[in-house]
Image: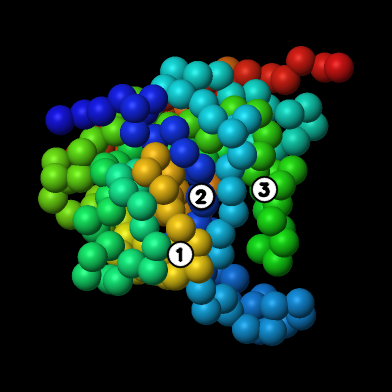
């Protein structure tokens, strides 16, 4: 059973950075130095602002003079209010899942939120639909694939998460209430690729769906 995005995923979009083990491993050396001093002990969060929302088949504008990178991710849609949720109860707060393409400009640092890189108009596509929680047997074992013009360019599995869904919900709801309709973007894996105007970008997640977006050049001012 699928549900429309408008019905169940209209809340805040919370991104989780560094949630793939391969990506975290690439940055471990830097985290031993200033300004970090040590690797993060809790989820590294950022917000995709409302202007970033985009849809299946939507156009993504490449800012002039910038590199644009898609980011395949599984979105977890919250179904009921979650505050100080335990690991055992976390999954009961999930309504379902959605394919996300979390577009970004390249990031050189995780020390401060990269608002200019993450929050451009149309930089968070979701769709085509929300798949109900009970229709996905094990969200912690899903294949993610990124296709550019039909060519497979990136592939990984949610089995490589640093924190699985119950851990994320438990740790985030410890200090911040999650509300129905909020979406946890569970992270993008290592190996992001550059895309160009005219490219057709597709993110496929096994059992959840395939999301299409088209890149166009941003009109000059």
Q: Quote the CA–CA distance across marks 1 and 2.
A: 10 Å
Q: Quote the CA–CA distance across marks 1 and 3.
A: 25 Å
Q: Is residue 153 visible?
A: no
- Say left or right for 67 vs 87: right
| CB contact under 8 Å: marks 1 and 2 | yes
Front in this rendered view, residue 32 or 54? 54
Task: Describe the element under mark 1 as helix, strand or loop.
Answer: helix
Q: Residue 75 carries which label?
A: none
Please report the residue visible at 70 percent of the width from the left and 66 percent of the height from the top: 111
Front in this rendered view, residue 142 or 14? 14
- The quarter of the picture where residue 33 lies is bottom right
Q: Quote the CA–CA distance across marks 3 and 2.
A: 19 Å
- The residue tagged 2 is 14
Graded by Cα atoms within 10 Å as few (under 14), some (14 to 19) or many (20 or more), the crowding at tag 1 reads many
- Say left or right for 99 vs 48: left
Please report the residue visible at 43 percent of the width from the left and 44 percent of the height from the top: 182
Q: Residue 106 carries which label?
A: 3
Q: Which mark is residue 172?
A: 1
Front in this rendered view, residue 213 or 119? 119
Q: In this view, does 212 lie above or below 77?
A: above
Of callouts 1 and 3, which one flags the residue occurring earlier in the amino acid sequence?
A: 3
Q: Position of residue 30 (x, y in %)?
A: 67, 76
Of callouts 3 and 2, which one flags the residue occurring earlier in the amino acid sequence?
A: 2
Q: Position of residue 9 (x, y in %)?
A: 39, 35
Q: Where is residue 43 in the image (x, y as percent from the top left)?
A: 50, 67
Q: In this view, does 172 lie above or below 122?
A: below
Front in this rendered view, residue 61 or 131? 131
């Amino acid at each position: 059973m699928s549900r429309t995005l408008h019905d169940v995923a209209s809340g805040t979009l919370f991104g989780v950075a560094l949630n793939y083990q391969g990506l975290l491993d690439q940055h471990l050396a830097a985290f031993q130095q200033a300004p970090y001093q040590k690797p993060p002990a809790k989820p590294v969060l950022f917000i995709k602002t409302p202007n970033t929302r985009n849809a299946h088949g939507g156009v993504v504008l490449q800012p002039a003079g910038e590199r644009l990178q898609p980011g395949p991710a599984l979105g977890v849609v919250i179904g009921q209010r979650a505050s100080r949720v335990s690991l055992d109860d976390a999954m009961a707060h999930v309504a379902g899942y959605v394919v996300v393409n979390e577009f970004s400009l390249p990031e050189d640092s995780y020390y401060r939120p990269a608002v200019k890189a993450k929050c451009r108009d149309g930089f968070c596509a979701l769709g085509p639909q929300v798949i109900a929680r009970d229709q996905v047997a094990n969200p912690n074992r899903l294949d993610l694939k990124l296709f550019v013009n039909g060519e497979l360019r990136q592939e990984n599995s949610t089995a490589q998460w640093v924190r699985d869904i119950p851990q994320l919900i438990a740790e985030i709801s410890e200090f911040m209430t999650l509300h129905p309709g909020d979406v946890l973007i569970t992270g993008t894996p290592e190996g992001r690729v550059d895309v160009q105007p005219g490219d057709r970008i597709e993110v496929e997640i096994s059992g959840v769906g395939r999301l299409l977006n088209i890149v166009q050049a941003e009109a000059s001012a």
